[in-house]
Image (tube, rainbow, N blue to C red):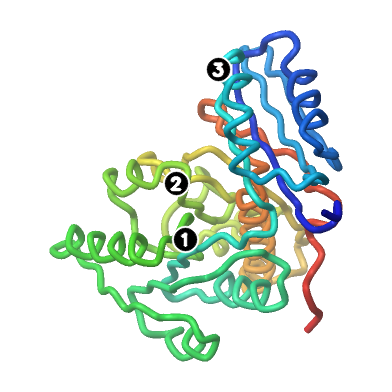
Amino acid sequence: MSALSNRYALRVACPSIRGVTAAIATYLSANGCNISDSAQFDDKSTGRYFMRVSFQSEEGLTLEALREGFAEIAAAYQADAEFFDETTKRRVILMVSRFGHCLNDLLYRQRIGALPIDIVGVISNHFDYQKVVVNHDIPFHHIKVTKENKPEAEAEQMRIVEETGAELIVLARYMQVLSDEMCRTMSGRIINIHHSFLPSFKGANPYKQAFERGVKLIGATSHYVTADLDEGPIIEQDTVRVTHAQSAEDYVSLGRDVESQVLARAIHAHIHGRVFLNGNRTIVFPPSPGSYASERMG
């Protein structure tokens, strides 16, 4: 079997124990696997060790066989280990309200293969983007959300997630607060995006508030969703510089651009298994060479 015929990866999280890196490398080599990329981090503050390895199975050993053979090593090092195929597209549900910049960006990135995801549905509490979504041959689900019907609305959302087999929910500027129950059910599998002005500028029109205060940096934060509103473990952040000469409307436009980029990078990190939860923080390894390559341009 050609070394280029598969691209597999292994994620490991375990207590920091001497010899774990060598054990993983030795196991893969002994089973006909060639490591193409490796990243590891030993967190002295928590005593936890994290590793992500990309490799090719050059002698035809399947992922299932590799998983089974690794079980003894995982037990010896008290490790949580996950083998997966890097070429398999992850099934994703997008949720959006009335701001469409992140939605449109993700639809385009999926179309050109810049993000190896399969968007299996879009859920919205408005009809604004129904036509856009349907034109991409993606199911659109309108679910109205009010204070009175919130439990029923979330039950319908979760039904769609389960029926589509979605592995990840992306809140692409979905302006509804999720219940604690939904956050717990999908722990580590919901990603959100918002501006980085919190906690300074809360509520409506944060960009206008920032403009009035003369802010010089506009930023965005993407994080996992928890029951603590906008305080989940951070995956990705970025900023863009603004000046006194720009308007409040400029702030909004620049903010939308950075939000779209940050959300896409956070999704990329998650679906490639580069993100590890470490208490209230995350370990985020760099992307492997070639992982940003698109299937086609335009």
Q: Earlier in the sequence, mark 2 or mark 1?
A: 1
Quick check: marks 3 and 2 in contact, CB under 8 Å?
no
Q: Residue at x 59, y 77 (%)?
A: 104
Q: Amino acid at mark 2?
A: Val
Provide residue 199's location: percent of width, then percent of height: 50, 43
**Quarter of the view holding residue 59:** top right
**Quarter of the view holding residue 293:** bottom right
173 vs 224, nearest the viewer: 224
Which quadrant would the C terminus be assigned to in this image? bottom right
Label placed on residue 75: 3
**Quarter of the view holding residue 44:** top right
Residue 46 can be seen in this image: no
- Element at badge 2? loop
Gap between marks 2 and 1, in whole Å?
9 Å
Gap between marks 1 and 3, in whole Å?
36 Å
Q: Amino acid at mark 3?
A: Ala
The 10 Å Cα crowd at callout 1, few under 14, some 14 to 19, many 20 or more, is many
Q: Earlier in the sequence, mark 3 or mark 2?
A: 3
Q: Amino acid at mark 1?
A: Leu
Provide residue 216's location: percent of width, then percent of height: 73, 53
Would you place residue 285 above or below residue 76 in this image?
A: below
Gap between marks 3 and 2, in whole Å?
30 Å
Which quadrant would the N terminus be assigned to in this image? bottom right
Q: Which residue is mark 1?
A: 171
Q: Earlier in the sequence, mark 1 or mark 3?
A: 3
